[in-house]
Amino acid sequence: MPSLSVSIQPEDFDIGQEHLRLRAQDERVGAVCSFLGTVRSQNEGLPVAAMTLEHYPGMTEKAILSMLSQAGERFDIYAARVIHRVGDLNPGDQIVWVGVTSAHRGQGFQACEFLIDYLKTQAPFWKKEQTPHGARWVDARVSDDDALARWGIDAPRQAFD
Amino acid sequence: MNITLRYFASVREIIGTGQETVETQALDIGQLRCELMVRSPRHGQALSSDKAVRVALNQLACREDTPLSEGDEVAFFPPVTGG
């Protein structure tokens, strides 16, 4: 069973420390793959001065642990961790980090991409941006659902689409 | 039966609260949404049928035909935009 963990937090994180911790005391590891998402200063043609991330405490952790379990079943990995920040963020800030350890790079790269694709469409987070035209909620992207479909998972057309 | 409602993001802002408890006769999520749409003009706007609204039952994604039970927590929110 891979070691799986999730952290939802307002605080920033140190990706160097996270890489070290993820592979600590596991000499089977031959690859660490990770993805870091950061706040862009532009979106949909407008400058973004700041952003607030809202989430659904309780459901967020459950949803991400379920994704991590599925990654553990699909891919040959030793450990996987997701960190996602919430609250007020500024351009350049780190938002999300996905880290995976494995024996070889192929399974690690795939598990990492699977996790971020899944998180983008299924974890209950919502971004609100501050722009020169005022605050606006970010719209979900169809391309994110398409990214998930590549893994053979249809974004559930839950109630009412 | 009594259920707890949770609202997030734009749905929360339009309705004007993040949580409320209601007594309902609805048998499933779809019927519940129809009941809520006539609860107030704000509910009607937030949950209107031309909007993509996601729903979770007891913190798990669910469908329109998912049945309801006493004490359930039902959340309504727009499509997610994390990551």
Image: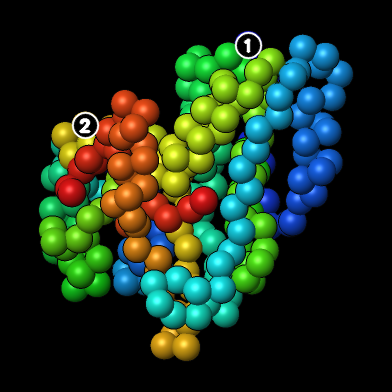
Q: Report crowding for label 1: few under 14, some 14 to 19, many 20 or more residues within 10 A (C-alpha).
A: few
Q: Which amino acid type is shown beneath numbered disc 1?
A: Met
- For the N terminus of chain A, give its image quadrant: top right
Dot 1 corresponds to which residue?
A1
- The residue nearer to you, when weighing A160 against A119, is A119
Cβ atoms at labels 2 and 1 below 8 Å apart: no
Q: Which amino acid type is shown beneath numbered disc 2?
A: Pro
Instruction: Single out the mark in the foreground, 2 or 1.
Output: 1
Question: Taking A101 as reference, is A149 above or below it?
Answer: below
Q: Is residue A158 among what the camera can see?
A: yes
Q: Residue furthest right?
A: A25
Residue sitting at 16 percent across and 34 percent down? B65
Question: Taking B60 as reference, is B12 above or below it?
Answer: below
State the SS at label 2. loop
Alpha carbon distance from label 2 to label 1: 34 Å
Occupied quadrant, residue A33: top right
Q: Report crowding for label 2: few under 14, some 14 to 19, many 20 or more residues within 10 A (C-alpha).
A: some
- The residue nearer to you, when weighing A118 against A147, is A147
Q: Is residue A123 left or right of residue A36?
A: left
* Residue B46 locus on image (x, y percent): 25, 66
Occupied quadrant, residue A51: bottom right
* Residue B57 locus on image (x, y percent): 34, 38
* Residue A22 locus on image (x, y percent): 76, 29
Dot 2 corresponds to which residue?
B67
Q: Is residue B19 among what the camera can see?
A: no
The chain to which mark 2 is attached is B
Q: Is residue B80 left or right of residue B49?
A: right
Occupied quadrant, residue A151: top left
